[in-house]
Image: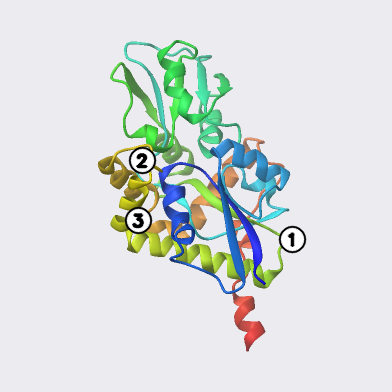
Amino acid sequence: MKKNISVAHSPDADDIFMYMAIKFGWVTSKTLSFKNIALDIETLNVEAIKGTYDATAISFGLYPKIADDYAMLRCAVSFGDGYGPKLIKKKGVSLKKNFKVALSGENTSNALIFRIAYPQAKIIYKNFLDIENAVLNGEVDAGVLIHESILEFDSSLCVERELWDIWNELSGGNLPFPLGCMALRRSMPLVDAIECEKTLTKAVKVAHDNAKTLSSMLMQRNMIRVDEIKLEKYLGLYANAESISMNELQLKAANKLFELGFRANFFHKLIDINDYLIPTDYENIRNS
């Protein structure tokens, strides 16, 4: 009998896209079965702190807080590379040092970078889908848009600052911006953990290799919030070949984010991501 694995991801296009190869039966495991649930990213972060799901999408900015309970998966990652979340405001408005801003969640990567750059800002947290309207109706002076919201927003709004630019300044440049990743419960037996990562990695690769077919299926099922043109653009940003499995540059970028958070006292310890990955070499040693 297969072991059941709960997989939580966000409802935005890149997460749905990277998981659906499993949902549609294109990718399977001989030993594991998967059941998914879609929740907004900050809810996923909160549930990860509670240890709710076996495998879960989280923000890179959360990971050091749950590293003792969750290993980091190499697959299904989202990085910004020349782009990322946007700090937006109404056109013609000048922001004071203590401006009121809406962010998508306390533990998100964009919140970490924003709080370092704007320590005097007054922050409220809202579902990312409600941030644009909060700026439009005057509830806040500004907001940080994420996910598909960065592709298009009301014409009365403008970009105050790209968080990519802030990340570049803080990180020293030449590193992609770590945004979303996957974590796996440490209590899972190692052989199952390795199989889980292999299956999820394959799902992301199959999705990428069959992007047009899968995108069409998602559009037909009304599972995506944007039109076909925006979906293609968005997936090119956040669900691309670099999402399949983290490379050395991405690992270095994650460590830089963790270092920045530690120096800003957001994390109680400094971690090296390489110490928290699934030890896939175990499988080869075990079978040798």
How far apart are the two marked residues, 2 and 3, measured between alpha carbons? 24 Å
Q: Is residue 247 visible?
A: no
The amino acid type found where label 1 is placed reads: Ser
Q: Nearer the viewer, mark 2 or mark 3?
A: 3
The quarter of the rendered structure image containing the N terminus is bottom right
> In this view of the protein, which residue sits in the foreground, 92 or 77?
77
Residue farthest to the left? 229
Q: Given this view, does label 2 or label 1 mark the residue nearer the observer?
A: 1
Q: Earlier in the sequence, mark 2 or mark 3?
A: 2
Q: Position of residue 261 (x, y in %)?
A: 60, 40
The secondary structure type at the circle numbered 2 is loop
Image coords of residue 15 (percent x, y): 46, 48
CA gap, disc 3 and disc 1: 33 Å
Q: Earlier in the sequence, mark 3 or mark 1?
A: 1
Q: Helix, strand or loop at disc 3?
A: helix
Looking at the image, do the residues carrying marks 3 and 1 touch, with CB atoms under 8 Å apart?
no
| Amino acid type, residue under disc 2 in the picture | Tyr
Looking at the rendered structure, the kind of residue marked 3 is Leu
Disc nearer the start of the sequence (2/1): 2
Nearer the observer: mark 3 or 1; the answer is 3
Where does label 1 land, which residue? 187
Q: Residue at x 49, y 51 (%)?
A: 253
| Residue that appears at 50% across and 14% down | 99
